[in-house]
Amino acid sequence: MENWIERGKKVRMNTYSSFPIVVEKGEGVYLWDLNGKRYLDFGAGIAVNALGYKHTTYAEALSSQLHNLCHCSNLYWNQPAIEAAEYLVKNTCFDQVFFCNSGAEAIEGALKLSRKYGKKKKGARCYRIISMKQSFHGRTLGALTATGQEKYQKDFIPLLPGVDHVVFNDIEAIKQAISEETCAILLEPIQGEGGIWPVDPDYLQTLRKLCTEKNILLVLDEVQTGIGRTGKLFAHEWYEIEPDIIATAKGLGGGIPIGAVLAKQEIANCFTPGDHASTFGGNPLACTAAKVVLQELLEKGLLAQVEEKGEYLNQQLCRLQKKHTVIKDMRGIGLMKGLEFHIPVQEIIQKCMDKGLLLVGAGTHIIRFVPPLVISKEEMDEGISILDEVLSEV
């Protein structure tokens, strides 16, 4: 593996602090490196591999589509894109879908749609967007501007104009920030990279009413919280509100890159040919992947299992918290949980990896748990046992 890593360092840009393993294959919720070592994956490619690895139905559908049609561009219609969009519309409060390739692209599309709607409804000066501090929306320039963490932004200033950041879960801060120039408010139902912080239910419901009263769009970043991750198809369903726009990605393709913007009809109608596009967005291969993921969730019972699995994981993490004083807090919904520690978590993550458990951080002091949605209780027990052992050593 060392040879491959050295080769990679010579030709790949240094944008990730990658761990020193080269992953070769996966099956179920396990990955193997080039040396044949097996790892239990509690990160799922950062909440992407919803169906785990080597999922039979998924692999067969993609193989069939690959032999039939991989790409045709949006100059023409293709059936998988229509079917995937129909699944999303049928099972949500939204009316139309725009497909792209990633979460950052979905956020970019949502920002553009929000600005066009604002200008159409209130005039040319209605373009400002309110976002949350400690949020994370992606690495492209627009998404980075919306992100409320200076550490990601400092080397790329000046950012785009027209984005204001306020404290998360503080309704008075929102009220003070709103002006006649505000077209949209953007937030994550659970701040992921910011530390697994769920939105307060009363806050989100009040925010929905406020947006309706002032004709401001409520835009949710469901890139990580969507596609069954919390036990609902989208996390906002827990809060009994309907956003105007959502951006989603990650688990939607189960490993094949795809993102989507979902919007209500009146808002979606603001986009006309030439306003927005993506060469690879909605290609048949990615949309076939999305269709299989949605079928497994909605028609084959996987979504119904996630809430139960999430509660079981919750119990196991609470048990760890009681046992190990190094753990400060536990929070999250479904299979999106976070453990906050009194110490930096890098050593814990490294020691778990050495023992065959892959974990993902969320900042310096938090480990997030976003395993494949197909994980079993026995596999969760295996992972918690390894973490328990490491925490006893630390």
Image: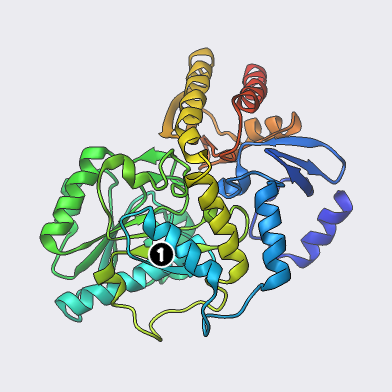
Residue most toward the left? 213
Quadrant location of the C terminus in the rendered image: top right
Q: Nearer the viewer, residue 80 or 236?
A: 80
Residue 97: x percent and y percent?
A: 40, 67
Q: Position of residue 48 (x, y in %)?
A: 57, 50
Farthest top residue in view: 323
Q: Residue at x 48, y 14 (%)?
A: 322
Q: Is residue 205 left or right of residue 9?
A: left
Q: Nearer the viewer, residue 198 or 308?
A: 308
Under circle 1, the secondary element is: strand
Q: How many marks?
A: 1
Foreground: 365 or 58? Answer: 58
Q: Is residue 379 left or right of residue 337?
A: right
Q: Is residue 27 left or right of residue 179?
A: right
Instruction: Answer yes or no: is residue 348 visible.
Output: yes
**Residue ID at (51%, 26%):** 313
For residue 198, which quarter of the picture?
A: top left
Does residue 154 appear anywhere in the picture?
no
Above or below residue 228? Residue 146 is below
**Rendered residue at 40%/45% (across/down):** 191
Question: x%, y% of residue 43?
Answer: 60, 41
Image quadrant in which you'd find residue 60: bottom right
Residue assigned mark 1: 261
- Residue 60 drawn above or below residue 83: above
Which amino acid, by three-letter code, is at mark 1? Val
Q: Nearer the viewer, residue 49 or 67?
A: 67
Q: How is the image coloured?
A: rainbow
Q: Residue at x 69, y 71 (%)?
A: 68
Q: Quadrant of residue 253?
A: bottom right
Q: Is residue 145 above or below residue 311?
A: below
Where 381 falls versus 67 (above or below)? above
Residue 52 image position (x, y, % from top left) = 64, 43
